[in-house]
Every structure is written in structure tokens, then in C-alpha cells.
Amino acid sequence: MIGPKEALEIIRFKLSRSRFKHSVLVANTAREMAVQYGFDEEQAYLTGLLHDYAKGISGQELIELAEDYGIELAPIDREVPDLLHGPVGACLLADELDIDDQELLHAVSAHTLGCLDMNGLDKIIYLADMIEPGRDYPGMERLRCLALRNLDYGMLLGLETTVKNCIERGRLLHPRTVEVRNQYLRLFGNMMDLA
């Protein structure tokens, strides 16, 4: 298993400068959240560093890799192939870096769309990706405050934020994100209750 120093060098070489900076900020935020919630902070930090391992791969190559790895593709995955960078990244981390930490791989796979069986690390990486200090969008500070108070409420607001952003920008919504959002909504009720 690689350590954080080796991971830093790998992503420094593999990712663009801005994506590298983002990954370091996600890693730091994930570590902060892991400390807050009593999870393994080193695992969270390493996962944050590696979460965008497949970012920057062309859409066509992501589709081909997903097919090679047997990842089930929804029609929207072919229309917006960048959404595959999580699951493809997890497969590449296992193959190219010999990472066998299943929690780390699952968190990388789920960090963009979410999934119905998210564990603590999954939620931390999903939210750290949205609230790292380099992010700036309407409602980000509210999401950051909530995510640092309650992971599940943070997930609901994070998912709602993603859905609203896609609608406002005229982007396609992945059915998995809608499904995960609906699951959290059923658990916790309307977001207005979280104000």
C-alpha cells in the first residue's frame, strides 16, 4: 500500500496543477472531517489525495476503460462520460498502484454521484470534494458548516446542492444522484428543517 508522500508525487505528475491543488485541499478537508467524526484520518487523507486519479482522462477512454472493467454503464454515462472518473479511478488505483483498501476504493468510486450504501469514509470524501477551501459557489459555507456538524445532513444538503446546480446550469442529472438524494430525503425530511 502506498503512503501519502508517494501518493502526492504520483498525483503531482498525473494531474493538472489545478487538479493537484484541489486534491490536496480535499485530502486536508477529509482529514479534518475524519478527526471530527472519529474515522481514520490517514485513510481519509490518502483517499482525498487519490479521489480524482482518473480525472483528465478523455471521455471516450473513460467509456472504454469502464467497459473493460465491467462497470455497468447507464445511458447518461455515455453522454457525460466524465462522471465515470470515480469508478474508473478506483479500478485504475487497484490495477496501477496495487491498492487493495476496499473502503478507499469504494469512496473514490462513489465520490461524484454518491451511492445507496455509503459508509463514513464515502460521505467524508463526497463532502470534502464539495467543501474544500478552493470551492466557491452559492451555499458552500452553509454546506461546510452543516457537513462539519452532521455527516448525513451534510450529505442531503450536498446532494440537493448538486441537483440544484445541474438544473440551474441546464445539465443532465444522473439517476443515481437523484436516487441517493431521495434516500436521504426519506430519512431526514425536507431541507428546510435543517436551517
Image: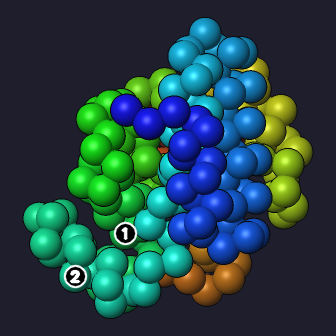
Question: Where's the N terminus, which quadrant?
Answer: top left
Q: Nearer the viewer, residue 70 or 2?
A: 2
**Res 162 seen here:** no
Amino acid type, residue under disc 2 in the picture: Glu
In the rendered image, which quarter is residue 4 located in?
Answer: top right
Horizontal and vertical percent for residue 29?
Answer: 73, 36
Q: Nearer the viewer, residue 43 or 146?
A: 43
In the rendered image, which quarter is residue 99 located in?
Answer: top left
Tag 1, which secondary structure?
A: helix
Tag 2, which secondary structure?
A: helix
Q: Residue at left 60%, top 53%?
A: 9
Horizontal and vertical percent for residue 54?
Answer: 44, 66
Please give left or right for residue 169 compared with residue 177 in the image. right
Amino acid type, residue under disc 1 in the picture: Leu
Q: Is residue 70 above or below residue 185?
A: below
Residue depth check, mark 2 versus mark 1: number of the one nearer the observer = 2
Q: Nearer the viewer, residue 72 or 70?
A: 70
Horizontal and vertical percent for residue 139?
Answer: 84, 53
Residue position for label 1: 84
Residue position for label 2: 64
Q: Residue at left 13%, top 72%?
A: 68
Q: Nearer the viewer, residue 174 or 84?
A: 84
Q: Is residue 170 above or below residue 175?
A: below
Q: Which mark is residue 134?
A: none
Q: Residue at left 32%, top 31%?
A: 101
Q: Residue at left 33%, top 78%?
A: 62
Please give left or right for residue 53 compared with residue 88 in the image. right
Q: CA distance from mark 2 to mark 1?
A: 10 Å
- Neighbour class for label 2 at 10 Å: few (<14), some, many (≥20)? few
Q: Is residue 174 above or below residue 9?
A: below
Q: Is residue 8 above or below residue 2?
A: below
